[in-house]
Protein backbone atom coordinates (compact mmCIF):
# COMPACT_ATOMS: atom_id res chain seq x y z
CA UNK A 1 0.00 0.00 0.00
CA UNK A 2 2.79 2.37 0.89
CA UNK A 3 4.60 1.47 -2.33
CA UNK A 4 1.45 2.18 -4.35
CA UNK A 5 0.96 5.51 -2.58
CA UNK A 6 4.59 6.45 -3.24
CA UNK A 7 4.24 5.51 -6.93
CA UNK A 8 1.07 7.57 -7.30
CA UNK A 9 2.71 10.56 -5.63
CA UNK A 10 5.75 10.20 -7.92
CA UNK A 11 3.55 10.12 -11.04
CA UNK A 12 1.63 13.21 -9.90
CA UNK A 13 4.94 14.95 -9.17
CA UNK A 14 6.33 14.15 -12.63
CA UNK A 15 3.13 15.33 -14.30
CA UNK A 16 3.19 18.53 -12.26
CA UNK A 17 6.79 19.25 -13.23
CA UNK A 18 6.08 18.45 -16.89
CA UNK A 19 3.10 20.82 -16.96
CA UNK A 20 5.08 23.58 -15.27
CA UNK A 21 8.01 23.08 -17.66
CA UNK A 22 5.62 23.31 -20.61
CA UNK A 23 4.07 26.47 -19.20
CA UNK A 24 7.51 27.96 -18.58
CA UNK A 25 8.47 27.26 -22.18
CA UNK A 26 5.27 28.93 -23.38
CA UNK A 27 5.96 32.03 -21.31
CA UNK A 28 9.60 32.06 -22.41
CA UNK A 29 8.63 31.96 -26.07
CA UNK A 30 6.48 35.06 -25.57
CA UNK A 31 9.14 37.06 -23.71
CA UNK A 32 9.54 40.47 -25.30
CA UNK A 33 6.39 40.26 -27.44
CA UNK A 34 3.82 43.04 -27.40
CA UNK A 35 0.27 42.99 -28.67
CA UNK A 36 -0.31 45.11 -31.77
CA UNK A 37 -4.06 44.67 -31.43
CA UNK A 38 -5.80 44.95 -28.06
CA UNK A 39 -8.75 42.84 -29.16
CA UNK A 40 -11.27 45.59 -28.49
CA UNK A 41 -10.68 48.53 -30.83
CA UNK A 42 -8.28 49.89 -33.44
CA UNK A 43 -6.30 52.12 -31.10
CA UNK A 44 -2.70 52.18 -32.32
CA UNK A 45 -3.74 51.76 -35.95
CA UNK A 46 -4.27 54.31 -38.71
CA UNK A 47 -5.85 54.18 -42.15
CA UNK A 48 -9.20 52.83 -43.27
CA UNK A 49 -11.22 52.29 -40.10
CA UNK A 50 -14.47 51.94 -42.00
CA UNK A 51 -13.68 48.75 -43.92
CA UNK A 52 -11.59 47.45 -41.02
CA UNK A 53 -13.17 47.02 -37.60
CA UNK A 54 -12.56 45.29 -34.27
CA UNK A 55 -15.03 42.49 -33.63
CA UNK A 56 -15.00 39.59 -31.15
CA UNK A 57 -11.26 39.82 -30.57
CA UNK A 58 -10.47 40.06 -34.27
CA UNK A 59 -9.59 42.67 -36.85
CA UNK A 60 -12.12 42.11 -39.62
CA UNK A 61 -11.88 43.65 -43.06
CA UNK A 62 -15.31 43.82 -44.65
CA UNK A 63 -15.07 46.17 -47.64
CA UNK A 64 -18.70 45.58 -48.76
CA UNK A 65 -17.93 45.95 -52.44
CA UNK A 66 -15.03 48.40 -52.09
CA UNK A 67 -11.30 47.85 -52.28
CA UNK A 68 -10.98 47.93 -48.52
CA UNK A 69 -7.90 50.12 -48.42
CA UNK A 70 -5.13 49.67 -45.89
CA UNK A 71 -4.80 49.63 -42.13
CA UNK A 72 -1.37 50.44 -40.68
CA UNK A 73 0.30 50.49 -37.30
CA UNK A 74 0.85 53.99 -35.99
CA UNK A 75 4.38 53.01 -35.06
CA UNK A 76 7.16 52.16 -37.49
CA UNK A 77 9.17 48.95 -37.13
CA UNK A 78 12.55 47.84 -38.43
CA UNK A 79 13.68 44.32 -37.59
CA UNK A 80 11.09 42.19 -35.82
CA UNK A 81 9.34 38.88 -35.26
CA UNK A 82 5.62 39.12 -35.98
CA UNK A 83 3.08 36.47 -34.99
CA UNK A 84 -0.51 36.58 -36.20
CA UNK A 85 -3.40 34.34 -37.15
CA UNK A 86 -5.65 34.80 -40.16
CA UNK A 87 -8.82 33.25 -41.50
CA UNK A 88 -9.58 33.43 -45.20
CA UNK A 89 -12.94 33.44 -46.94
CA UNK A 90 -13.30 31.78 -50.38
CA UNK A 91 -11.10 33.54 -52.94
CA UNK A 92 -9.88 36.09 -50.40
CA UNK A 93 -6.93 38.34 -51.22
CA UNK A 94 -5.12 40.61 -48.77
CA UNK A 95 -1.54 41.45 -47.99
CA UNK A 96 0.86 42.13 -45.14
CA UNK A 97 2.74 45.37 -45.68
CA UNK A 98 6.13 45.81 -44.00
CA UNK A 99 8.57 48.73 -43.96
CA UNK A 100 5.83 50.73 -45.64
CA UNK A 101 5.18 54.47 -45.71
CA UNK A 102 1.59 55.60 -45.26
CA UNK A 103 1.26 56.71 -48.88
CA UNK A 104 1.73 54.82 -52.11
CA UNK A 105 1.44 51.15 -53.08
CA UNK A 106 3.07 49.20 -50.25
CA UNK A 107 4.07 46.39 -52.64
CA UNK A 108 6.53 48.80 -54.26
CA UNK A 109 7.24 51.66 -51.85
CA UNK A 110 7.52 49.11 -49.02
CA UNK A 111 7.17 45.35 -49.27
CA UNK A 112 4.04 43.21 -49.48
CA UNK A 113 3.71 39.61 -48.38
CA UNK A 114 0.78 37.93 -50.06
CA UNK A 115 -2.20 36.74 -48.00
CA UNK A 116 -4.24 34.70 -50.44
CA UNK A 117 -6.60 31.77 -50.90
CA UNK A 118 -4.31 29.96 -53.35
CA UNK A 119 -6.85 27.20 -54.00
CA UNK A 120 -9.50 29.46 -55.53
CA UNK A 121 -10.11 28.71 -59.23
CA UNK A 122 -9.71 32.36 -60.17
CA UNK A 123 -6.07 32.17 -59.06
CA UNK A 124 -5.23 29.09 -61.15
CA UNK A 125 -2.76 30.95 -63.36
CA UNK A 126 -0.88 33.19 -60.93
CA UNK A 127 2.75 34.11 -61.34
CA UNK A 128 5.04 32.31 -58.88
CA UNK A 129 5.59 35.50 -56.89
CA UNK A 130 1.86 36.01 -56.30
CA UNK A 131 1.09 33.00 -54.10
CA UNK A 132 0.52 33.21 -50.37
CA UNK A 133 3.57 34.23 -48.37
CA UNK A 134 5.55 35.52 -51.34
CA UNK A 135 7.36 38.84 -51.23
CA UNK A 136 5.23 40.26 -54.00
CA UNK A 137 7.15 40.55 -57.26
CA UNK A 138 10.43 39.49 -55.69
CA UNK A 139 10.63 36.12 -53.87
CA UNK A 140 8.17 33.23 -54.39
CA UNK A 141 6.95 31.18 -51.43
CA UNK A 142 6.45 27.43 -51.16
CA UNK A 143 2.87 26.30 -51.59
CA UNK A 144 0.64 23.70 -50.01
CA UNK A 145 0.65 24.69 -46.32
CA UNK A 146 -2.51 26.79 -46.00
CA UNK A 147 -5.28 25.27 -43.93
CA UNK A 148 -8.66 24.83 -45.65
CA UNK A 149 -10.64 28.03 -46.14
CA UNK A 150 -12.56 28.90 -42.99
CA UNK A 151 -9.92 27.45 -40.67
CA UNK A 152 -7.41 29.61 -38.83
CA UNK A 153 -3.80 29.79 -39.99
CA UNK A 154 -0.81 30.73 -37.86
CA UNK A 155 1.94 32.78 -39.45
CA UNK A 156 5.26 34.14 -38.24
CA UNK A 157 7.27 36.72 -40.17
CA UNK A 158 10.88 37.33 -39.16
CA UNK A 159 12.56 40.39 -40.66
CA UNK A 160 16.24 41.22 -40.22
CA UNK A 161 16.83 43.60 -43.12
CA UNK A 162 17.44 42.50 -45.84
CA UNK A 163 16.70 38.93 -44.76
CA UNK A 164 13.19 37.60 -44.30
CA UNK A 165 11.58 34.34 -43.22
CA UNK A 166 7.90 33.37 -43.35
CA UNK A 167 6.62 30.41 -41.32
CA UNK A 168 3.09 29.21 -42.05
CA UNK A 169 1.45 26.65 -39.76
CA UNK A 170 4.86 25.49 -38.58
CA UNK A 171 6.47 25.23 -42.04
CA UNK A 172 9.01 27.67 -43.46
CA UNK A 173 7.52 28.72 -46.79
CA UNK A 174 9.94 31.55 -47.58
CA UNK A 175 13.47 32.39 -46.57
CA UNK A 176 15.71 34.77 -48.42
CA UNK A 177 17.38 38.13 -48.92
CA UNK A 178 15.16 40.49 -50.89
CA UNK A 179 18.04 42.76 -51.92
CA UNK A 180 20.08 39.83 -53.16
CA UNK A 181 17.03 38.36 -54.90
CA UNK A 182 16.43 41.59 -56.80
CA UNK A 183 20.05 42.35 -57.68
CA UNK A 184 19.60 41.28 -61.30
CA UNK A 185 16.05 42.62 -61.46
CA UNK A 186 12.75 41.66 -59.86
CA UNK A 187 10.55 38.77 -60.97
CA UNK A 188 7.75 41.13 -61.97
CA UNK A 189 10.20 43.38 -63.86
CA UNK A 190 9.05 46.44 -61.93
CA UNK A 191 10.84 48.93 -59.74
CA UNK A 192 10.66 48.17 -56.01
CA UNK A 193 12.37 51.10 -54.26
CA UNK A 194 10.85 49.94 -50.97
CA UNK A 195 13.25 46.99 -50.88
CA UNK A 196 15.89 49.43 -49.67
CA UNK A 197 13.77 50.58 -46.75
CA UNK A 198 14.82 49.12 -43.40
CA UNK A 199 11.87 50.41 -41.36
CA UNK A 200 8.30 51.54 -41.77
CA UNK A 201 4.72 50.70 -40.88
CA UNK A 202 3.19 47.23 -40.73
CA UNK A 203 -0.21 46.98 -42.37
CA UNK A 204 -2.99 44.87 -43.78
CA UNK A 205 -3.55 45.66 -47.45
CA UNK A 206 -7.11 45.23 -48.62
CA UNK A 207 -8.08 43.88 -52.03
CA UNK A 208 -11.84 43.82 -51.68
CA UNK A 209 -12.31 40.58 -49.73
CA UNK A 210 -13.35 39.58 -46.20
CA UNK A 211 -10.45 38.38 -44.02
CA UNK A 212 -10.16 37.97 -40.23
CA UNK A 213 -7.02 38.54 -38.16
CA UNK A 214 -6.31 37.89 -34.48
CA UNK A 215 -3.53 37.35 -31.90
CA UNK A 216 -1.23 39.91 -33.52
CA UNK A 217 2.02 40.17 -31.54
CA UNK A 218 5.43 41.62 -32.27
CA UNK A 219 8.92 41.48 -30.84
CA UNK A 220 11.38 44.11 -32.02
CA UNK A 221 14.91 42.99 -32.85
CA UNK A 222 18.09 45.06 -32.83
Image (cartoon, rainbow, N blue to C red):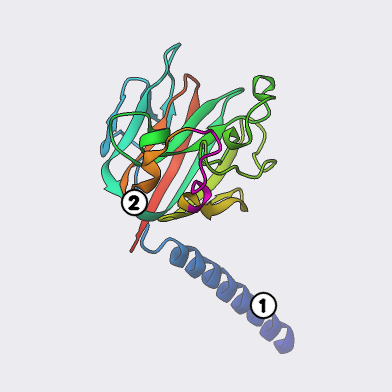
Residue beneath the point at 62% across and 73% down = 15
The spot of residue 18 in percent (x, y) is 59, 73
Q: Looking at this view, name the residue that lies furthest to the bottom.
A: 2
Q: CA distance from mark 1 to mark 2?
A: 52 Å
Check residue 97 for magenta coloring: no
Residue beneath the point at 32% across and 29% down = 104
Q: Nearer the viewer, residue 146 or 174?
A: 174
Which span of residues is magenta-colored? 180-189
Q: Nearer the viewer, residue 122 or 153?
A: 122
The spot of residue 71 in percent (x, y) is 34, 31
The spot of residue 204 in percent (x, y) is 41, 33
Say left or right for 175 vs 1.
Answer: left
Residue beneath the point at 53% across and 72% down = 21
User: Which of the numbered marks, if any, corresponds to residue 198?
Assistant: 2
The image quarter containing residue 139 is top right
Residue beneath the point at 47% across and 45% down = 84
Q: Of the residues tagged 1 and 2, which is closer to the observer?
A: 2
Please determine whether, in this image, residue 157 is positioned above or below residue 64: below
The image quarter containing residue 65 is top left
Q: Which residue is mark 1?
A: 11
Mark with earlier residue (1, 2): 1
Please determine whether, in this image, residue 84 is positioned above or below residue 127: below
Amino acid sequence: MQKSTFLSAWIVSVLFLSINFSQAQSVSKEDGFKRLFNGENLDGWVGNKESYRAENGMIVIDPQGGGGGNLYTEKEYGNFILHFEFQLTPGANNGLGIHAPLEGDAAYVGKELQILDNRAKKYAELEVYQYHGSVYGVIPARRGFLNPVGEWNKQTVIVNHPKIQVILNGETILQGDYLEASKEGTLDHKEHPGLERSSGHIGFLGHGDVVHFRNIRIKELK
